[in-house]
């Protein structure tokens, strides 16, 4: 842009200089001719005339430079700067990077001012459209997240309903024979003649007890929801659950700290809430390998009463998070049944609350039980 303006200024300067020379040439030639005739050869006047005649090309060159600089300054102020500003705005609009400070009309004549005002209106309209698009995209993402959660909840509810129907037809029939088998195994262990046979019987007893835990979990899932929540002192329930699990082998090397808001009353049931908290405490201890710290926090906010169990374990992998509350899904191998969290979720929903899991800020996992305020 500047080189183009300089070229135009040079052409204008040359044109003006040429016109000036053509206009003044006859007068200057006549004056020099008259001076030459009047001055004697070799006199001082003759030398001055010769100097004037030699200065004329330099004067024309200086005139050309001065006119070129003057034309450049005028063209740059009136045309160059407004055009460069307009060009920058157009490039900005092309990149959809709309800076309102660069869109103010500048001095550049009526035509450029109108162009810049039109660009300013276009940029303002584009900004409004961008804001509207961002708002719509944010709303669509939120709606999609809600739909995904609703779909996950529906799938989980359908699976729980299927497991419940299965439990209604099988659990009671299997539970009674298992109780008999456990009784006979206890008698057989007392009368075992050899340590080897006693070890075999203990292994059988361990596996049968595992089947018994699965059956009891199926009964919990298949049991109809007949809960009648009432006011429950959350801090008292949490302290009771912590005292109960302190003697468990999973919590031998685990420190449980409490951060409970005093006087917090939720609408819940003591039994199901205790079952949920005990399950979460045992899971947290097992996730840390029996070593570390578990923090239990209770707070009241706009969403209700929240009880959070936070551990210092490795956290929940992304591939596990989506299946965490599925029945029979477990990461503990043969040591788990995969029903603890599914039953806890069902119990929380039965009291009008919810159970959610997420990874902590640094390490570890956080399980949050949300209950209505009493």
Image: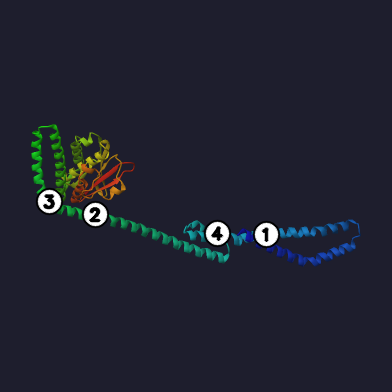
Residue placed at 44% from the left, 62% from the top? 126
Tell me: residue 68, above or below residue 329.
below
Q: CA distance from mark 3 to mark 1?
A: 102 Å
Mark 3: secondary structure? helix
Q: CA distance from mark 4 to mark 1?
A: 22 Å
Q: Which residue is mark 2?
A: 153
Q: Which mark is residue 85?
A: 4
Q: Which mark is residue 170?
A: 3
Q: Which residue is mark 1?
A: 70
Q: Quadrant of residue 143?
A: bottom left
Q: CA distance from mark 3 to mark 4?
A: 80 Å
The answer to which of marks 3 and 2 sits earlier in the sequence is 2
Residue placed at 74% from the left, 59% from the top? 61
Q: Quadrant of residue 193?
A: top left
Q: CA distance from mark 2 to mark 4?
A: 56 Å
Contact (Cβ within 8 Å) of mark 3 with mark 2: no
The answer to which of marks 3 and 4 sits earlier in the sequence is 4
**Front of the two marks 3 and 1:** 3
Q: Which mark is residue 260?
A: none
């Amino acid at each position: 842009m500047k080189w183009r303006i300089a070229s135009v200024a040079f052409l204008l300067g040359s044109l003006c200089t040429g016109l000036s020379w053509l206009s003044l040439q006859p007068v200057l030639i006549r004056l020099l001719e008259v001076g030459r005739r009047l001055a004697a050869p070799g006199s001082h006047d003759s030398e001055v005339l010769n100097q004037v005649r030699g200065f004329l090309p330099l004067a024309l060159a200086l005139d050309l430079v001065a006119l070129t600089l003057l034309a450049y300054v005028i063209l740059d102020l009136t045309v160059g700067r407004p055009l460069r500003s307009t060009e920058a705005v157009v490039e900005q609009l092309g990149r959809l990077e709309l800076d309102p400070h660069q869109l103010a009309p500048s001095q550049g004549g009526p035509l450029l001012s109108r162009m810049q005002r039109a660009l300013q209106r276009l940029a303002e309209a584009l900004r409004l459209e961008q804001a509207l698009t961002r708002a719509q995209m944010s709303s669509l993402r939120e709606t999609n997240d809600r739909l995904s959660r609703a779909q996950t909840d529906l799938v989980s509810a359908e699976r729980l309903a299927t497991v419940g129907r299965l439990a209604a037809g099988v659990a009671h029939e299997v539970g009674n024979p298992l109780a008999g088998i456990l009784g006979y195994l206890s008698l057989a262990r007392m009368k075992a003649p050899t340590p080897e046979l006693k070890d075999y019987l203990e292994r059988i007893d361990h596996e049968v007890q595992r089947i018994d835990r699965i059956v009891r979990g199926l009964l919990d899932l298949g049991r109809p929801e007949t809960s009648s929540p009432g006011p429950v002192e959350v801090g008292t329930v949490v302290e009771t659950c912590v005292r109960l699990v302190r003697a468990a082998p999973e919590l031998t090397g685990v420190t449980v700290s409490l951060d409970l808001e005093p006087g917090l009353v939720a609408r819940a049931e003591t039994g199901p809430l205790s079952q949920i908290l005990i399950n979460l405490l045992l899971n947290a201890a097992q996730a840390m390998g029996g070593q570390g710290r578990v923090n239990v926090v209770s707070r009241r906010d706009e969403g209700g009463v929240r009880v959070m169990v936070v551990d210092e374990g490795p956290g929940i992998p992304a591939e596990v998070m989506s299946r965490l509350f599925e029945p029979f899904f477990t990461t503990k191998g043969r040591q788990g049944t995969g029903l603890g969290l599914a039953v806890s979720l069902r119990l929380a929903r039965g009291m009008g609350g919810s159970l959610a899991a997420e990874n902590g800020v640094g390490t570890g996992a956080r399980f949050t039980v949300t209950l209505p305020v009493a």
